[in-house]
Every structure is written in C-alpha cells, then in structure tokens.
Amino acid sequence: MTRRLGGGKLVIATHNAGKLREIGALLAPYGIECLSAGALGLPEPAETGTTFVENALIKAHAAAKASQLPALADDSGLSVAALDGRPGVYTADWAERQWFEGPQGRDWYMAMGKVEGMLCELGPQTDRSCWFSCVLAIAWPEGDEAVYEGRIDGTFSWPPRGTMGFGYDPVFVPRGRDVTFAELDPAEKQAMSHRADAFAKLVAANF
C-alpha cells in the first residue's frame, strides 16, 4: 500500500521562489505547512538523472534525509516536438550562464532565445507544438516514495509576452488559449498547468 501524506510539515525541495509559491498555494487547503529547502539551508543535490522522475526522486530523498521530514520535489521542463523533445529534462541547464569555471545563475531569456533560434533554423513552417511536463515526488525519511506526473500541451510563441510567470512561461501558449502562461492570472495558470495536473493526482492519492 502506498504511503500517504498527512497534515503537518512538508519540506519543499526547491530553492526556486516561483515554484515554492505555486506548490504552497496548491497544498494550503490540506493543512500542510510548507518549509523550503532554501530556508532550512539544505544543500542542492546534483541532478544526475536522465528523466524527470529520476531527478525529482533524487531531490526528494536528499531533502527528506537531511531534514528528517517528508519532502516533496518537483522536476519539470519544456519539451519541443520539432527539437526531438529538447530541452526536456535539461530545461534548467539551457538557462545556465557560465562565466569562466562555474554557473553564474540562470538566464531564462537566453534559454528561450536558444529554442527560438533552433526553431528558426528549421524554417518558417516548423511545427511549434510543445509541452510542459511535471513530476512530483514525495519521499519520507524512512525511504518510502511516491511519484505523480502531469502534462499540458501548447505552442512555443515568440517574442516572449507577459510578466506574471517565470521560466519559459512567457513563450508558452496553452492549447485552446491565445495568451501565454505569463499573461494569465497566476490563479488561472495554477488551475490548468502541468503542475496542477500532477497535483490533482497527488491529492486524489493522499487526501
């Protein structure tokens, strides 16, 4: 039988403020007190997996072990059909700015521009369909784990539009809409996003 979350404290294994806000808002109705890995001073483990599931489990288990609390990790990314699913699991890596010998933060505009440049090289008739994937992994200090996967399909749009999102939100137009994620009210985005899809599955299994 799969272990279930109860109320109480849950470590969110992220240092990303945008993700923390979304996850905290989605869990708030269930009596969960969310603590961020960043606020607890937990180190960020190396994401050595080759899939969203592997990376989410790496982060969740590291946070659970370090905090001795249940931990929830999110691994998500943008996949573009014409680019054979890239950047996919390496979405965040495409935004890393390098200076001499180490990463110096993430430049999402640079990453969005890289995708646009590759699509332009393929020609004006290139398929711009894409999708956001999200994997939510829960781990307990004792080693138990559970995984929930979500997805939303859409179109890669250029130039970027909107200021209310983060990451690739300004270039992602969800299917059936004509505005980007970054132009949507955050509550509306949360209700339809890949993360919301994964959370719906998490909630159905745990509460």
Image (cartoon, grey):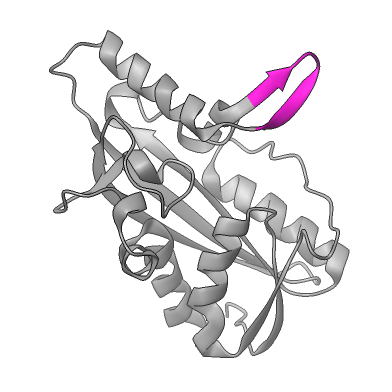
Residue 81 horizontal side relative to residue 133, left or right: left
Q: Quadrant of residue 60?
A: bottom right
When the figure is inspected, residue 168 is found, relative to residue 70, above or below; the finding is above
Image quadrant assignment for residue 121: top left
The part of the chain drawn in magenta is 97-105
Which residue is rendered at x = 47% and y = 43% of the image? 77
Viewer-side residue, 66 vs 178 = 178
- Image height of 126 relative to 190, above or below: above
Locate residue 64, reporting x and y percent.
78, 66
| The N terminus lies in quadrant | bottom right
Residue 24 x, y percent position in the rendering: 57, 73
Q: Is residue 12 above or below residue 115?
A: below
In the image, taking residue 19 as reference, residue 170 lies left or right, namely left
Up-down relation of residue 26 to residue 88 (above or below): below
* Residue situated furthest front in the rendering: 163
- Expressed as whole percent of the image width and height from the top left, the position of residue 152 reads 30, 53
Q: Main secondary structure of the magenta part?
A: strand
Residue 161 falls within the magenta-colored stretch = no
Q: Residue at x 70, y 50 (%)?
A: 58
Count the labels in the image.
0
Query: Can you give x and y, in whole percent of width and height, for residue 160 in the image?
Result: 34, 36
55 relative position to 190: left or right = right
- The residue under the point 69% across, 60% down is 13
Residue 104 magenta: yes
Q: Nearer the viewer, residue 89 or 176?
A: 176
